[in-house]
Amino acid sequence: MGNLVLGIETSCDDTSVALVDIQGNVATIETVSQYEIHSEFGGVYPELASRAHLEAILPVIEKVMAKAEVTPIDLRAIGVTRGPGLMGSLLVGLSTAQALGMAWNIPTYGVNHLRGHIRSVDLEEKRLAYPALVLLVSGGHTLLAYLEDQHSYKLLGITRDDSVGECYDKVARTLGLGMPGGPAIDRMAVAGTAHIKFPRPMIKSGYEFSFSGLKSSVARYVETHAEFDVNDVAAAFVDACLDILSTKVLRGINELKPATLAVVGGVAASPQVRACMQNITEKSGVTLCLPPQKWATDNAAMIAMATWDYIEQGIEADLEPKPNLKLGDA
Ligand code: KG4
Ligand code: ZN
């Protein structure tokens, strides 16, 4: 039996394939971004996304296998994202994985993308320890969860409207910074000062989030201040986001006393978010687990990593696409 998992991720706009062993060592990874295709639409265009996945997927798999000098005999399993995500995009990954699994006679697991993000912290080095508080901040999701052990996923709160990543992207557009918005906002924010006080919706209590009011407030500010300074607006926006995220995380740390805090998802690539979480955890004696920065955004290595849990825990392989899969679902 082989000792590598072939991970496949096609839930949104990246076609990503990786080979990962049980320790989280990434033998190879290739990711084809559809950034150019969608940039003129200001968001991901579902039909174009699935077509681009279809064109990319087999050459990417071939390239990854060739680069690592791996043949099907070296594989323990295939793990492919089955949700949440765009139906057409998920189907490309799932049907390809299923066909290869049958042809190669290898078990093939449908994997929860959100669990993939959580396991991204164990890539290259084992970091996650239980009980863990998890902050997942991506383009599609924003949530806080409490993981008592590797089998339990207790959702503490989600966003009522926009995700943090979506908010970064929309504010970037308002400021004329283009896509992808997150890194552009990061760059502007470090050069500015946060003297504008934007609102911090729902900060006072609980674990739920809301970001649409903050986003509209930035848009209103820009409309009403002809001479606004892009760097200062970006800095004030980031300041508000960090205030909201850190307040909720600290609330979770104080109430639940986790051993570790895992901060995952595309927005966890932000240097400001990483520094802010470092600061909080140092003060509260909790160990911070971050994914290597390059694997915070969507990638197949995290899906392969999560597949090892499915194998070890004997979770039944389910290849049905689930665009609305929840954190608690396998
Ligand atoms: O996890 P991800 O790749 O996709 C989803 O599962 O949604 O997250 C994408 C989001 C985008 O909204 C993007 O703007 C944000 O992550 N992002 C960042 C950074 N890199 C990506 N946000 C802030 N700073 C970054 N460096
Ligand atoms: Zn994601």
Image (cartoon, grey):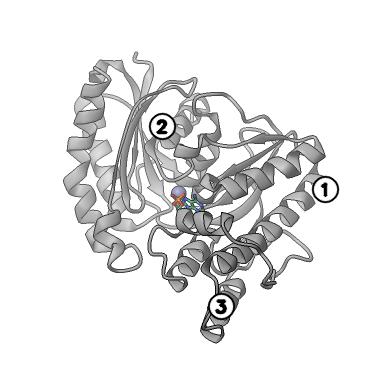
- Counting labels gives 3
Q: Earlier in the sequence, mark 3 or mark 1?
A: 3
Q: Is residue 309 above or below residue 254?
A: above
List x then y, in percent, for residue 24: 48, 24
Q: Is residue 286 above or below residue 269?
A: above
| Disc marking residue 255 | 1
Q: Earlier in the sequence, mark 1 or mark 2?
A: 1
Given contact means CB atoms under 8 Å apart, are the residues at marks 3 and 1 in contact? no
| 3D distance between C-alphas at marks 2 and 3 | 38 Å
Give the class, few, some or many, for how many residues have Cα within 10 Å of label 1's Cα (few <14, many ≥20): few
Pick whichever, 33 or 232, lies toward us. Answer: 232
| Disc marking residue 304 | 2
Kindly indicate the quadrant of the structure image that contains residue 299: top left
Residue at image x 22%, y 60%? 48
Quarter of the image with the N terminus is top left
Pick whichever, 23 or 153, lies toward us. Answer: 23
Q: Residue 319 vs residue 37: left or right? A: right
Residue at image x 50%, y 68%? 171
Q: Secondary structure at mark 1?
A: helix
Q: Secondary structure at mark 3?
A: helix
| 3D distance between C-alphas at marks 3 and 1 | 32 Å
Amino acid found under the numbered disc labelled 3:
Ser
In this figure, which residue is indicated by the disc labeled 3?
A: 216
Amino acid found under the numbered disc labelled 2:
Ala
Pick whichever, 29 or 195, lies toward us. Answer: 195
Amino acid found under the numbered disc labelled 1:
Glu
Q: Is residue 41 above or below residue 225?
A: above
Given contact means CB atoms under 8 Å apart, are the residues at marks 1 and 2 in contact? no
Q: Secondary structure at mark 2?
A: helix
